[in-house]
Amino acid sequence: MKQIFLIISILFAMTTNAQQTNYHFSHTDSTSATSDKIWQVWTDVPNWKQWDKGLKEAILEGEFIVGSKGKLIPDKGPKSKFIISELEPYKSYTFKTKIPFGWLIIKRTLEVKEGKTYFTHDVEFTGLLKKVLGKKLGKNYREMLPEVLTEIKRIAESK
């Protein structure tokens, strides 16, 4: 039994560490705000710039549904287009942006445990240049992520 526990622990540690690179990383925070309030902040695309300090503007063309497209205009760098590729209302959604030879995939998930709302942003660069782009862009995104989630929490708790 101890051996099984040890193997599971090692596999979990390997999985956790594998996702904490500059090309695939995540951050989770918790709040007393309801999951509905976090969802409201997350799906209000024109106001993403309130909590994503690297973003000048975000535009969604149509409703917040799978297949909807939008544009991201960062403070620095070129504009990019995104598409909502997965959606489980009030639980999670994924959007992706085309990058050279791959994708930048952002997945946001909610979970309620013991009266607290846990919310996670998972960021992944895929494709041939994932390590190069992760080093160039991912490092900064990774460093900013805790501050981004703190700001989302502040906005949700003030609603």
Image (cartoon, helix red, strand yellow):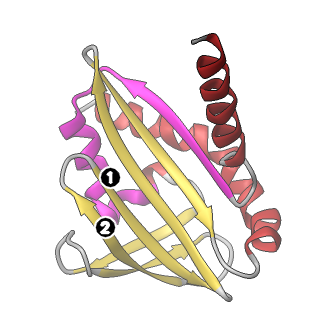
Q: Is label 1 in a helix, a strand or a loop?
A: helix
The question of residue 41 being in magenta is answered with yes
Quarter of the image for residue 131 reads bottom right
Q: Nearer the viewer, residue 148 or 103?
A: 103
Magenta region, residue range = 24-49
Lower position in the chain sequence, tag 1 or tag 2: 1
Q: Position of residue 155 (x, y in %)?
A: 35, 37
Quadrant, the N terminus: top right
For discs 1 and 2, the disc positioned in front in the rendered view: 2
The residue positioned 64% from the left and 24% from the top of the image is: 9
| Residue type (three-letter) at the residue carrying disc 1 | Trp
Residue found at x 68% / y 88%: 100
Residue designated by label 2: 86
Check disc 2: other Cα within 10 Å, few if <14, some if 14-19, many if 20+.
Answer: some
Query: Is 95 left or right of 113, judged from the image as shown?
Result: right
CA distance separating discs 1 and 2: 14 Å
Mark seen at residue 71? none
Which numbered dot is residue 42?
Answer: 1
Residue 130 at x, y percent in the picture: 73, 72
- Badge 2 element: strand
Q: Residue 89, relative to residue 113: is it above or below?
A: below
Residue 88: % across, % down: 22, 56
Q: State left or right for residue 2 relative to residue 43.
A: right
